[in-house]
Amino acid sequence: MQFSVLVEVTLRPGVADPQGATIERSLPALGFTEVRGVTVGKAIRFTIEAAGEDAARARVAELCERFLTNPVIEDARIELHEVAAAR
Amino acid sequence: MQFSVLVEVTLRPGVADPQGATIERSLPALGFTEVRGVTVGKAIRFTIEAAGEDAARARVAELCERFLTNPVIEDARIELHEVAAAR
């Protein structure tokens, strides 16, 4: 089975986010006074082959922990959907 | 009303994605042979005040087009949820 995966990598609470802070500071001068709490993270997408959803999720979690994130400063949120098989 | 927003910024099809390509090229040597089609984009989160969901969505679309993305090479996907009001 093939799964489409989105990994959202965000900075952990307390870690400085200069990109988000810069955007937030600039917006009022640009006319967007109603926006608060801007944070910038990464959105990594890919497809993975696995026997089932649980296997896919476990494998993606391992991938995140080992290569896609720095667990000291980043958190990962995993979103996963089965892709209809090609016939 | 307050809305929690996720903007996923991705490179448009055909635009080179060196981060994604590097990750994809490295994974087989690291034991992940079942991963394909890696792309790396940005995940921008914030909250916005608006009169309703349609107004919030329109305002976020304007924000994306004017400041958060480069529409020549990037696409934006907007996800939006109402936040329960504080009492």
Image (spheres, coloured by chain):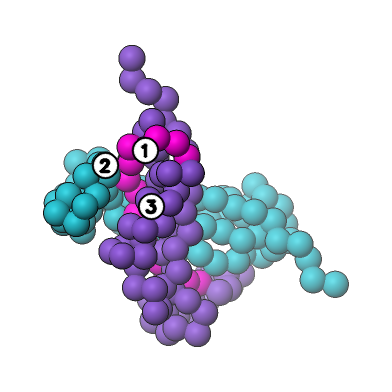
Chain colours: A purple, B cyan
Crowd band around label 1 with a 10 angstrom C-alpha radius: few (<14), some (14–19), many (20+): some
The x and y percentages for residue B44 are 45, 63
Span shown in magenta: A38-53
Seen at 33% across and 57% down, the residue is: A63
Residue B28 visible to the viewer: yes
Q: Say which chain tag 1 marks.
A: A
Dominant SS in magenta: strand
Disc 3 or 1, which lies upstream in sequence?
1
The x and y percentages for residue A9 are 41, 64
Q: Which residue is mark 2?
A: B34
Seen at 48% across and 44% down, the residue is: A54
Q: Which residue is mark 3?
A: A60
Tag 3, which secondary structure? helix
Seen at 56% across and 74% down, the residue is: A37
Residue B74 visible to the viewer: no
The x and y percentages for residue B56 are 62, 55
Of residue B31 and residue A87, the one placed in the foreground of this image is B31
